[in-house]
Image (cartoon, coloured by chain):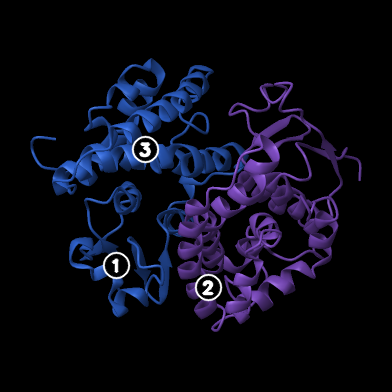
Amino acid sequence: MAPIKLYGMMLSANVTRVTTLLNELGLEFDFVDVDLRTGAHKHPDFLKLNPFGQIPALQDGDEVVFESRAINRYIATKYGASLLPTPSAKLEAWLEVESHHFYPPARTLVYELVIKPMLGAPTDAAEVDKNAADLAKLLDVYEAHLAAGNKYLAGDAFTLADANHMSYLFMLTKSPKADLVASRPHVKAWWEEISARPAWAKTVASIPLPPAV
Amino acid sequence: KMSSPVKVFGHATSTNVARVLLCLEEVGAEYELVPVDFLAGEHNTPEHPFGKIPAFQDGDLVLFESRAIARYILRKYRTPGSPDLLGENGGAEEAAMVDVWTEVEAQQYHPAISPVVFECIIFPVMRGAKTDQKVVDESLERLRLVLGTYEERLSKSRYLAGDSFSFADLNHFPFTFYFMATPYAALLDEYPRVKAWWEDLMARPSVKRVCANMPTKF
C-alpha cells in the first residue's frame, strides 16, 4: 500500500495541524517539501493537488485532499474514529470555534511575532495589540469552559477539537505572547496535558524553529 | 412526531442564522425561530457564550456555531427522502470532498466576498457607516481569483464536491445572497458556470423559503 503523502513545509502551522494528527494516530507518511519561499506552491504540478495553491495537501492512494481541517476530518474518519466520537455536537462546536474564532487572531500573532522576525520583516505592533486583545477575550471563554468540568474541549476525552489547536498553540507559546496561555490556569493546564501526549514530541521535533525562538 | 420543534435563536436576516434555517428546510425539520435583541444585550445569555447568533436548542442540547449546528441537524434529522448533504453515507472519500469545499467556503471564499457585503450593506445599515471603497476593491480582486478557481472546478463537476448538491454548496448561500444585492452582482456574469451553479442553488425550494425572509433592498 502506498504511504500517505503530505505536501508542505513544517514551518507552517497549517501543515503541522495535519502532522499532529498523523503522528497522534501513528500513521506513516512521506513528507514532500513545498517551499513557499521558492514559489513551489504556485507550480502547475502542485496546483493539480490544491487549485488554491496553498499548503498542506495530502494524497492517500487516489484520494487528494486539501484544507488542513478537511484533511484532518478525512484522516480521523478513515484511521482514527476515536478522535471523532459520537454524539458529536459539542465536538463540532469546538472544531468551529478553532476555525473561526481562535485561528484568525492566533495566525496573525504567529505571523507577526514568529514568522516575520525569521524573514527579517518588521512586526506591526498595532496588529499584534488588536489580535492579542481578541485572543485574550476568546481564551477567557476557553478558561470558563475548561473550568466548568471539561478536561478537554469536548468533555472527558481528547478529540480532534483539541488536536486542531495544537500547532498554533505551540507557536504562540514560542512567541512573546505566551502569557496569553500561561496566565489562564485551566487553559495552561489543558495545554500542558495535551502537549504531554507522547506523539506530540515527534511533531515538535519536526518543526524547524530557530534555537533563539 | 412526538418531539417538539427545535429552537433557533436569532434573526432570519442573519447570514449565519440563514445557514441553519437552510439545513432545517432541506431536511424538512420543524423549527421555531426565537428573535434575539442584540441592542438589548440579550445575546449574552447562557446560550451564547461568544455573544453571537445563532444559538440552537434541541431538547436539553444547547449548541452554538452555525456550521456545527448545521451538521447536527443534517445528521439527526435526515430522512430517507432527504439528500445526503454531508456525503457521510458515501464513506470517507465522499465526505472528504464535501469537507474540502466546505473549508474552501470558510477559508477562501468567505474572506473574499464578506468584506464587500459588510462595506456595502451591513456597516451602512447597522452603523450608518460609509463604504470603504479600498476594502471593496481589494476584496473584489481577491474574489475574482477565487471565482476563477471555482469556474475551473465547476467545469469538472456539477456541484462543488461532486455531482450531487451538498453542504459545501449550501454554505455559500448566505453571503452570496447579500453580495447579489450589492452594486457588484454583475461580477458573477464573468464566470458563467459559477452563475449557473448559483441560479441552480437559488431555485431550490428550501432556498426560496429562506430567501423569503431576507431583504434584497436596503
Which chain contains the residue that carries disc 3? A
Q: In the rendered picture, chain B carries what hue?
A: purple
Position above or below: B209 against A50: above
Estimate how packed mark 1 is, as few (under 14), some (14 to 19) or many (20 or more) residues with alpha carbons within 10 Å. some
Residue A120: x %, y % from top left: 13, 46
Q: Which residue is mark 3?
A: A106
Q: Which residue is mark 2?
A: B150
Disc 2 residue type (three-letter): Tyr
Q: Is residue B156 left or right of residue B192?
A: left
Estimate how packed mark 3 is, as few (under 14), some (14 to 19) or many (20 or more) residues with alpha carbons within 10 Å. many
Disc 1 residue type (three-letter): Lys
Secondary structure under tag 3 reads helix
Which chain contains the residue that carries disc 2? B
Secondary structure under tag 1 reads strand
Q: Which residue is mark 1?
A: A5
Which corner quadrant holds the C terminus of chain A? top left
Residue B169: x %, y % from top left: 64, 65
Residue at image coords 21%, 44%: A116
Q: Is residue B152 left or right of residue B27?
A: left
